[in-house]
Amino acid sequence: MPKLSVRGLYKSYPNGNGGVTRVLDDISFDVHDAEFLSIVGPSGCGKTTLLKIIAGLMEPDSGEVYIDGTRAKMGHSKVGYIFQQESLFPWRTVRQNIEFGLEVKGVSPQERRRLSGEIISLIRMEGLEDNLPHEVSGGQARKTEMARSLITSPDLLVSDEGLSNLDAQTRNYLQEEFLRIWKETGSTILFVSHNVDEAVFMSDRILVMSNIPAKMIGEFAVDLPRPRERASTGCLEYRAKILEMLRIEQEKALARQGG
Ligand SMILES: Nc1ncnc2c1ncn2[C@@H]1O[C@H](COP(=O)(O)OP(=O)(O)OP(=O)(O)O)[C@@H](O)[C@H]1O
Ligand SMILES: [Mg+2]
């Protein structure tokens, strides 16, 4: 049974002219247990909308989300969410940020401390736990967000451009950290990125979304051994195929606008 099943999702938003704009148009896919699945697609195509629906933060117009075969309704808390914008509480220390989800669940302070200690060592940030977010690097802040999402042992971890807005070196480092943590925790990951190189480097499988109304237009099983070499022929071949698909999609969108 898949970890996540998305079935026939439709979503429209009011467009300001009294009408609606359809964003998601019959989106269906599965994510398997312990899989690393990425979704790439043009900006504004509905990736964040899709993740919010999966995480139970937004209701679709129609369609269903199943986690471990059970229908996931609005407000469920089975998904750990790494947001597109940095979302750490600036007044809480690293440790207090990481423990937030456990506090909400009413976990005792001793147990919180034990679990946050484990995860701080998993992300290799011992010694920084009492710092505030502005007292750690951008990369460490991202790892803190990752830890905050992981600490409640979610069934599924979704990352919405979780590694964007970082310099190339930090981004590469965090990609490797993210992969290590994925392996060590056995998590299932749904990863949204507009960076095709990143998706190829990290994923077991990549889905490509079209412009709105967004459909799934492509699927690539990345059949390359790990650890991967970013500049290897294999990676570059997948990259070229996916970029070509996105280029054709972009030209279609431009033709629609022009016509
Ligand atoms: N609350 C909202 N009300 C109206 N329109 C919205 C709302 N949220 C998003 N949209 C529109 O829906 C479309 C999809 O937005 P979404 O944020 O899901 O895209 P995205 O693929 O995550 O984009 P990006 O790659 O830039 O993050 C966009 O055209 C956006 O303007
Ligand atoms: Mg987005």
Image (cartoon, grey):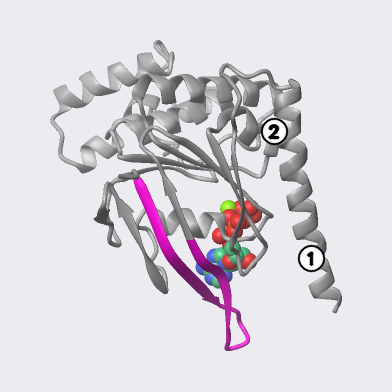
Q: Magenta-highlighted stretch: main secondary structure? A: strand
Say above or below: 35 vs 71: above
Which residue is pictured at 43% across the width and 15% down the height? 125
Mark 2 highlights which residue?
A: 197
For ligand 1, the image quadrant comes to: bottom right
Q: Secondary structure at mark 2?
A: helix
Measured from the top left, where is residue 235 in percent x and y? 70, 27
Graded by Cα atoms within 10 Å as few (under 14), some (14 to 19) or many (20 or more), the crowding at tag 2 reads some
* SS state under label 1: helix
**Viewer can see residue 131:** no
On whether residue 76 falls in the magenta region, the answer is no
Residue 148, by quadrant, is top left
Q: In the image, what residue type sits under mark 2?
A: Asp
Q: Is residue 154 above or below residue 10?
A: above
Q: CA distance from mark 2 to mark 1?
A: 23 Å
> x and y percent of residue 35 in the render?
43, 34
Which label's residue is closer to the chain start, 2 or 1? 2
Which disc is residue 252 wearing? 1
Q: Is residue 47 left or right of residue 54?
A: right
Identified at 56% across, 18% down, the residue is: 226
- Range of magenta residues: 4-27
| Location of residue 20 in the rendering, given as x and y in whole percent from the top left corner | 56, 81
x 39%, y 68%: residue: 63
